[in-house]
Structure formats: C-alpha cells, structure tokens
Image (cartoon, helix red, strand yellow):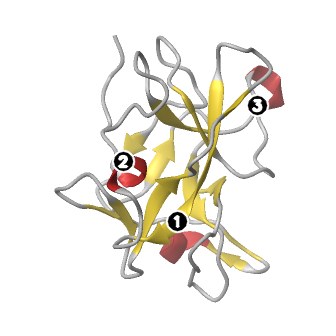
Amino acid sequence: MDNLDRPNDGYCLDIMGSGRYVRFDMPMTAHNCKPGLYHDEAVVIEPEGRIRFPAYNACATVAGLNKKALAGAAIMPRGCGERSPFLEADNLQKFVFHGNGQIELENSGLCLTVGNESESTFDDTHRWRALFVQHCEKAKLTHSQWIFKIPN
C-alpha cells in the first residue's frame, strides 16, 4: 500500500528471474511493479488463501519445517499443494487477508513484509527488497500492508 521509495509504481511480489530464466529455487522478492502484467508478478488469490502465479502454477510458500514457519523466513515459489521431502506446502501456502492490508500466514501471526532497504537490479531504474514473514504486530505497517490490483 505504501510505495516506499518508489512513488510512481510501488512494490509487487516477484519471482526472481525473467523469461526462460525464472528461478524457483531462489527466494521471492518485492520488486518495483512493472508496467503491464508480467508472468513473474501476475497473481490470483485463491479462495482458500493461496497466492498463485497462474503462468507457472506456483504458489507463494513460506519457508518452514513441520508445517510451521519462523519470523524472518523467506517466501519461495513452489508448486501449489506440493508434497515433497521436507516440504508439505499446504500449511505454508494459505494466507489470511486482513482488513488493514496485512497478509498473515494462516494461524501463525506472521505477515508478509518487505525489508527496510532497497537495491537496484540489473537495471538502475529497477529496485528490489527482501520479502519475508515477520510477527504481524512487530512489522511496520508501511512495509507489511498490501493491495492487489489489475495494472493499467
């Protein structure tokens, strides 16, 4: 909701990489929102609370263990409902969208948050920030309130 250091475009959830080089093995970031609708930023909010990237059938997944996550955990793009060694993604992919704009990992008290610092990407006009979960009550609202919209 707060555009932070990007007054004209703000930040979007982003899968690292682009085109043929999208990286599902790397944590997601908050990247300045690009004009238009790109596969690595286009999401659908599923009825059960998943944040799904339809172009890849991947869902935002909090890195955790035994169905639980800790504050500071990264967000990874993983298969929706994935079950693989050390990952039962179902509990780590369901989010609750609160009226104040915070997005909480269901029953965890942890909210999607961006870091305090930004840095340029491969293009000096683009910026990124770390994306992780933080205790909702400790997360700065400027860094943990989100709005999903269809871009112009």
Q: Do the numbered discs 2 and 1 sit on residues whose CB atoms are within 8 Å?
A: no
Q: Is residue 80 visible?
A: no
51 sits left or right of 18 in the view = left
Inspect the image, locate mark 3, and give the three-letter code of the amino acid beneath it.
Answer: Gly
Residue at disc 2, secondary structure = helix
Question: Of marks 3 and 2, which one's residue comes earlier in the chain?
Answer: 3
Image side of residue 115 versus residue 104, left or right: right
Q: Secondary structure at mark 3?
A: loop
The residue lying at 57 percent from left, 84 percent from top is 67
What amino acid does circle 1 point to?
A: Val
Disc with the residue nearer the chain's start (3 vs 1) = 3
Q: Which residue is mark 2?
A: 142
From the viewer's perspective, tell me whether residue 53 is left or right of residue 138. Answer: right
Name which of mark 2 and mark 1 comes first in the sequence.
Answer: 1
According to the picture, the residue beneath numbered tag 3 turns out to be 17
State the CA–CA distance, disc 3 to disc 2: 26 Å
Give the x, y percent position of residue 72: 61, 70
- Assign the C terminus to one quadrant of the image: top left
Q: Which residue is mark 1?
A: 133
Mark 3 in CB contact with mark 1 (< 8 angstroms): no
Task: Identify the residue at horizontal 65%, vertical 39% (top origin).
Answer: 15
Of circles 3 and 1, which is in front?
Answer: 1
